[in-house]
Image: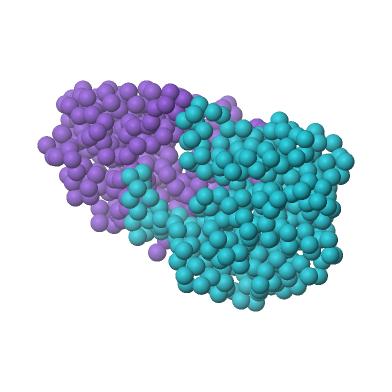
Chain colours: A purple, B cyan
Amino acid sequence: MPSHHAEILVEVTRGGMVESLHRGHIAVVDFNGKRIASAGNPDYYTFARSAAKLLQFVPLLESGGIERFDLTEEEIALCCASHNGEPQHVEAALGLLHKLGLGEGDLDCGKQDPYYKPAAERLSACGCSPSQLHNNCSGKHAGMLALARLLDAPTESYIAREHPVQRRMLSAVADLCGVEADSITLGTDGCGVPVFAVPVSALAYAYAGIGRPDRLAPERAEACRRITQAIRRHPFYVAGTDRFDTRLVEVTRGRIIGKMGAEGIFAASIPEEALGLALKIEDGAERASYPAAAEALRQLGLLSSSETQQLQSFLTPPVLNRRGDRVGELRPVFQLTRS
Amino acid sequence: MPSHHAEILVEVTRGGMVESLHRGHIAVVDFNGKRIASAGNPDYYTFARSAAKLLQFVPLLESGGIERFDLTEEEIALCCASHNGEPQHVEAALGLLHKLGLGEGDLDCGKQDPYYKPAAERLSACGCSPSQLHNNCSGKHAGMLALARLLDAPTESYIAREHPVQRRMLSAVADLCGVEADSITLGTDGCGVPVFAVPVSALAYAYAGIGRPDRLAPERAEACRRITQAIRRHPFYVAGTDRFDTRLVEVTRGRIIGKMGAEGIFAASIPEEALGLALKIEDGAERASYPAAAEALRQLGLLSSSETQQLQSFLTPPVLNRRGDRVGELRPVFQLTRS
């Protein structure tokens, strides 16, 4: 049973009054699994959603996927992405599929309007419909097809739980999180594939580990380094224009690598400090996850004041009315408990 | 200071596991102000948002607006609406403006894509941009302009707090809620006009009163009857296709009249029982407000099992993935406390 001791993390104001509240859970863990700080219940058990993507692509990379498919760093970042569906994302996803001798029709993620509104508007202005390539998960699905090829497994049923691709990914997620595979409850993601439930602290531990993989087997450690390096060098491909995941890497010059997930999930790796952070907004609101994440990083002393300023629009985003006037804001209100 | 004793009202499941939670506050009050039932903190103080619209139009109707402008019931319902921006809504808003000798450019609500996705898609397919008439609040703004005309007040600045229109509306909202006007904190709505903060229980009391206005002054009582009658007869105009506010009136044949508001607000009037209900989802999630409202009405014995079944898609809406498969659901989990 999940504990409900969620802490108020973010307030939403309107006209100087608090209109809504977001509660949640935060865990900050080092690469030995030692808890450094927390809010709410750091062991809250929940779906990691798209924050698991970085972990899911360790199997492809540790098994020779880079060499076999001549993967570029942009493509690696895209495999881990919840991308905006901007033209570069779409092209990179299609390019990866072509390397596999596959096309858009081999994806099984479903069609989706680009996250990035100008990209969606350009599509509809030209009378075009979004394709599966515009789905924010198209890179992940293309990467799953790559792993299917690498494993000589069928490419048709790659989203099924019993498919070798999904089994390998489950096993890697469990190992990196430091939990047993059979302790992970599976759900189905928005894009049709399995998602993994783990304690928030286990997700933080996995993120500490991918940033400081010294204690992992050499192939796995190298896979982790390739993943964080790809995102550090090409943060646009993990999210896109105006997105927190992209801006966090840019602003910190790759010192912090973060990844959002649906229903209020966020996880970050801080390799230099051998730290991982993960959080869940209890009610699933994405709008609260970035203020909470940015504030937690700030309290940990991981953002300089100049970096904090550059991330201000994510830390305390305004509430605007339809005329564009600022009528309120989101603001973090928690204090991390140090362990 | 708002109390934070919010109760868990709705769970969001995925794959049989609870993924997210929504807490909130519910008040059920009779037309004498007596509390009948509650969940969380029924006196939680929050912005009534668009649930105040029914109360805001009492001044226009009690001051002879119907006769002066030959208002139809569709137009009255539209004044109280957060509508879908469907063609009928747009035409009715424009028709009302024309009666005032005004046009779309006199609105000050800002442009907005129609809420109703097929209407938004039809607009963009023909290369059209949304106008202010498509804004879900265009009926309210047209009605505010009607009240300005009725009061011989300027139509330019009608959204300002000190404008006679806004002062009259504040006064009526306070009276109907049974609170002092200066106890109401004002904020700015998404559409630019003032919004009113009151206890959830006061909003419920106002909704009980508009449904059973016997004890109000005759002109005010008649205005309340006209408003509820307009919505009862033309529920499409208060919301639109596939909307809970519209379906609730249709399914109960007008026995229950409900109105949503942004940030997880819902209020309902049950005239036959002389009851009002209001609720606030703490985190502001609209997705949780309908399951909570439908379940509260069910527990109060106000929905038959056939009506409950017809509202099932609002009571326990599915969580779908992008392929359209059901991967979870929202489900109410609270028990109202009877007073």
Q: Position of residue A146 (x, y in %)?
A: 21, 33
Residue, x 20% and y 29% (percent of image)? A102
Q: Nearer the viewer, residue A3 or B99?
A: B99
Evaluate whether residue B273 shows in this view.
Answer: yes
Q: Is residue A66 left or right of residue B195?
A: left
Q: Position of residue B314 (x, y in %)?
A: 48, 58
Q: Is residue A279 above or below residue A103?
A: below
| Quadrant in which the C terminus of chain B appears | bottom right
Residue, x 30% and y 36% (percent of image)? A140
| Quadrant in which the N terminus of chain B appears | bottom right
Q: Residue furthest left?
A: A152
Q: Is residue A56 left or right of residue A260?
A: left
Identify the image quadrant of residue A307: top right
Q: Nearer the viewer, residue B91 or A11?
A: B91
Q: Position of residue A226 (x, y in %)?
A: 29, 28
Q: Residue furthest bottom?
A: B339
Q: Position of residue A15 (x, y in %)?
A: 72, 43
Q: Is residue A194 above or below residue A63?
A: below
Identify the image quadrant of residue A269: top left
Residue, x 17% and y 38% (percent of image)? A155
